[in-house]
Image (tube, rainbow, N blue to C red):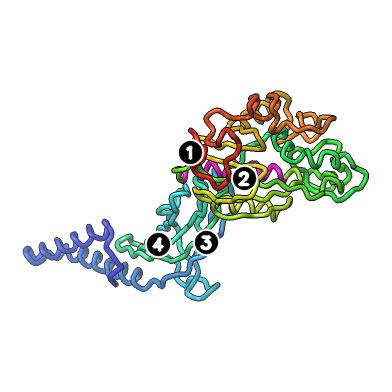
Amino acid sequence: MASVRLTRRGRVVVAACLLGVVMAVAAGGRSLNAVVLSGGVALVAGYLQVARIETPRVERSRPDDGAVGDTREVSIAFHGTAPGESIASPFVARVTDGLDDGLDGDATAMSTTVGAEPVSYTVRYAARGERRFGPVTLEATDVFGLFTRRMDLADETVVLAYPQRQPVPARFRRGLYADGALGQSRQREEFDRLREYARGDALRDVHWPATAKHDGIVVKEFAAETDDRRVSIVGRTAAGEGDAAADVLASATASLGLALLADGVSVDVTLPAGTVAAAPGPTGRRSLLELTARTGPGDPAVDADQDVLVVADEADAWLRAGDSVVSFADLRAEAGERAGSDGTDAVGFGDGTDGIGSEDGTSGVGSGDGTGPVGSRDGTATGSPIADGGTESAGSLDGGERR
């Protein structure tokens, strides 16, 4: 077979056999016959063993989707030519699994016995987006290590690497929906359901009997808290920006959207890759993560009003809510300061002590008195690509932009 090649050891054996033949012919030495004969037998046996190997079927375990930086275990098993059939004659081989540029793992030249135990390795999601495994390459060898045969097995697996999630202060989040929901949220007479604890839930809402029966914390949710509260988010990259800005946009949008979903607030998210309407719960979270994982640079060119406009370049993202503009870096810093100062959850406290649950029902977002999330009296963020006047539409790429 053309795919069967000599290894370095095999070439040494061939050279030794040829040298023995030449010396035997020249000198007539019979003592060299044993070397030549044993080497020739090994070469023939090794070639036949490798040449007769049937190409196996490969089955790779699909690792779960995850965020950038997550690690997963990948397992590769081999079967006979028919589905579920075991390999009649296991053979020694080195296995290499193809990984795209967004995956990091030691998946090269893993020695194993094909047909025995599966081979496994650990992979890390290094970049956001669709990540591909495969194809699998086998380099089979005979028992003497004289011949090798390469087999490329066309098997691909696709996973999604989600953007990294960052904490978002409860003060900013709740200001996006508190005006319309704060009065209703105090009507706590009508119980609605039990649900898993989410960041920002108040301690008073923990349902202790149900928590005792489950591995995690269970909280009570009231009918007023499940009213149709929605926040619309539109995101785009600044003019001329590329994939690096898209990564920043995806992280900022996913962080804000997931935090709002954890608060029980539905979100309508529009990005260059499409639009999703996500409701609180696993399905809504997954649809949001899938959109942010796949989005690239660009402008969705949406003319409708939105509650939050996110504009990103490769350095940072800026969020405009009403007349106020705040950088995503400032939000992360604020969340970190809250977590470090009082030990509470950086994503939210849920007990009305974080500056949103004031008695007058006012919100800190978009205020012009310096109490908003930006902390500036004019409601703008220095260095923001969003126009100062607050009149820029989501679809505008050049109107009023500045660096």
N-terminal label among 4 and 1: 4
Please give the range of residues in magenta.
243-261
Graded by Cα atoms within 10 Å as few (under 14), some (14 to 19) or many (20 or more), the crowding at tag 1 reads: some
Q: Which mark is residue 347?
A: none
Q: Which residue is mark 2?
A: 254
Between circles 3 and 4, the one closer to the viewer is: 3
Q: Residue furthest bottom?
A: 82
> Is residue 55 left or right of 347 when viewed as pictured?
left
For label 1, the SS is loop
Measured Cα–Cα span from mark 3 to mark 4: 14 Å
Vertical relation: 193 (above or below) 138: above
- Which residue type does callout 1 highlight? Glu
Q: Which mark is residue 314?
A: 1
Membership of 245 in magenta stretch = yes
Q: Are marks 3 and 2 in contact (CB under 8 Å)?
A: no
For label 3, the SS is strand
Q: Residue furthest left?
A: 26
